[in-house]
Amino acid sequence: MSTAALSPAPTARSSRSDAVFRWTFRFLALAPIALIVALGVELYRASQASRLAFGWGFLTGSAWDPVFDHFGAWPFIFGTLVTTAVALVLAVPFGVGTAVFLAEVAPAWLRRPVGYLVELSVAIPSVVYGLWGIFVVVPWLQQTVEPWLGQEFAWLPLFQGAPYGLGFLAAGLVLSMMVTPFVVSLAREAISSVPRSQSEAAYALGSTRWEVVSRVVLPGARSGIWGGVLLAVGRALGETMAVTMLIGNRPAVSSSLFAPGYTLASVIANEFTEATTPVYTSALIEIGLILFAITLLVNLLARIFLYRMSRPMGGTA
């Protein structure tokens, strides 16, 4: 007797349950997309007054004068890009090196606890990083690092000016510690996904460990590593509390990493409650729209790289 003959015929009640199940999970799957679209539409609508007043010049304007309702977002865009760049310059080499160590070099007894500590650091609140930065990093930069950099590399505009302690360098340094775990986690996963047979073939041909890592493992994990870097960029762009506590909060553009600055996220956190005019409020919302667009674009690029990493090597997904 066939299995089909033994199975009971679907009832109207079970058909209704299946339909409810399908539509419920369709709704749950589409809800995040709808929320993102609704957020973008609301930010665009609420920033209308600023867009009508300043147009595209809002992106390049440097004035930020709440008294006369004249606003420009360039100092905040500049500060966001600079702190993110500093964080990446410090975090990417350290993160990729740590991932290579955990995946290829570390003994089994050390791999698990170190990996656990790296993942645990993601759970530390950003305000704790900010407090640590104020009481430890800023005095160290002001008294030791920045004077030395200013003396040894005075010919570079990046290291000129008074050693304030608070500024782009302090914010970028602490931000690099916050985004390094993202780079380590995804780079390690990408390295582990490289077929072991390729490394063994390279060893069989007489390659050293350095040659295997540099010529086989890292090129094979390139897409995943870049995906991790872009996800770290997305986190760095939107970080608020720690950066607000360390960057100095001055809307100015400077070529020196010692100078105070401002970021898109920190100006919203600092000034939104002080916005007393419709144009002022709309300008802050437009800054939020800019940050939303940049972060969304970076995360989409990261997902593309991660998708490429997940495809089987030598074939199609």
Image (spheres, grey):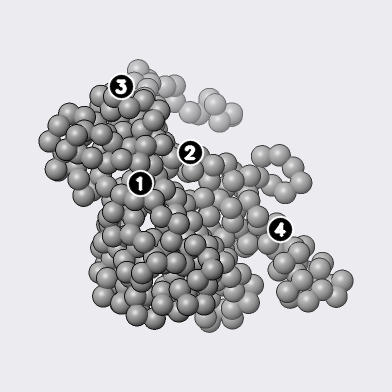
Pick whichever of labels 3 and 2 is earlier in the sequence: 3
Q: Which residue is mark 3?
A: 52
C-alpha span from label 1 to label 2: 18 Å
Q: Amino acid at mark 3?
A: Leu
Q: CA distance from mark 4 to mark 3?
A: 48 Å
Secondary structure under tag 3 reads: helix
Between label 4 and label 1, give the one nearer the viewer. 1
Q: Residues within 10 Å of mark 3 (few under 14, many from 20)?
A: few
**Real-space Cα separation, disc 4 to disc 1, in angstroms:** 36 Å
User: Which amino acid, by three-letter code, is at mark 4?
Assistant: Pro
Quarter of the image where one finds residue 307: top right
> What's the amino acid at mark 1?
Phe
What percent of the width, then of the height, locates residue 283? Answer: 27, 34
- For label 4, count other residues whose C-alpha is less than 10 Å away and answer few (under 14), some (14-19) or many (20+): few
Q: Is residue 94 left or right of residue 296?
A: right
- Disc with the residue nearer the chain's start (4 vs 3): 3
Neighbours of disc 1 within 10 Å: few (<14), some (14-19), many (20+):
many
The mark lying in front, picked from 4 and 3, is: 3
Residues under numbered marks 2 and 4 in contact, where contact means CB atoms less than 8 Å apart: no
> Nearer the N terminus, badge 1 or badge 2?
1
Which mark is drawn over residue 219? 4
Residue where numbered disc 1 is placed: 76
| Residue at figure coordinates x 35%, y 30% from the top left | 40
